[in-house]
Image (spheres, rainbow, N blue to C red):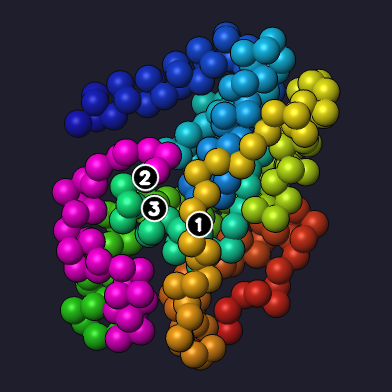
Amino acid sequence: MKAFSKKKKSAKVLAIKEQIKSGYSGDFGFMHIPKTGGTGVNAFGKSLVERGHRFPCIFGHGWTVQEILENFPKIQINFILRDPLSKMISGFNSRIRQGRPTYNSIWTPGEASAFTLFPSVRNFFDAILADDEFNKSAVAYTMRRVRHLHWNYGFYFKNLETIRANQSSFRLIGTMETLNEFVGGMTALVGAPESLAREFYEKQHESSTRAEQALEGYSPKEINRIRNFLRRDYRIYSELMTLSGRPTASDLPPEA
């Protein structure tokens, strides 16, 4: 098992090195946190490199901050943030659709079991609010097995101490609301004309269903309880938003 893990890790590192050889920047990287608009950023970066420009190398969903810096200690990391509850709703619904229409990524056995328990995100919220032992176990299982739920801010940043220890390696922190500005900033970082972002960047993989629609019918108290379930992610999110210059302390859910 350890030999397999080392082989898999080496393949991940080799893939980044191959990106750099093909024209991506080795000084800057884009860490693609799922459900934050990264698909369009990746496609834009690929189009720039194909046109002979530079772009930060792309670290896919499986890369964490610690893993990036262990293997590329001098790199400056860029990433996009999204409100944790909105991100969770979007991630749950994306995996229900198996990534369609942009992708066609079939469920893992664990995901199939999770979606048998919870065929909709509202069923999942109801289980969080039920708070009995069966539902607690089912929710915990689903959080581990559904990939976009497992890939939460705790996965990428671990905790506040890790963020503070590595904050000098964070360069640009974007949001879903500032994607155009973020993409233009990354383009400028590597010396490419910022006008290219206006010309070639397009948002991709967007659902026509807004995440907030899943919360319709829940009371403010119930929504706060659901947000409290994500309290660890909200603490990380708030810390990172403060680093970005857009503090969100008032958005931290109240103590349950």
Q: Which mark is residue 100?
A: 2
Vertical relation: 2 (above or below) 172? above
Dot 2 amino acid type = Arg
Secondary element at image label 2: loop
Q: What is the magenta range? A: 101-130
- In percent of width and height, residue 204 lies at 55, 41
Sequence-first disc among 3 and 1 = 3
Sequence-first disc among 2 and 3 = 3
Determine the residue positioned at 57% across, 46% down. 37
Vertical relation: 30 (above or below) 156? above
Asked whether disc 2 touches disc 1, contact meaning CB atoms under 8 Å apart, the reply is no
Q: Which mark is residue 94?
A: 3
Q: Which mark is residue 208?
A: 1
* Of 231 and 87, the residue lying toward us: 87
Give the Cα distance between marks 2 and 3: 7 Å
Within 10 Å of disc 1 (Cα), the crowding (few <14, some 14-19, many 20+) is few
**Residue 74 visible in image:** no
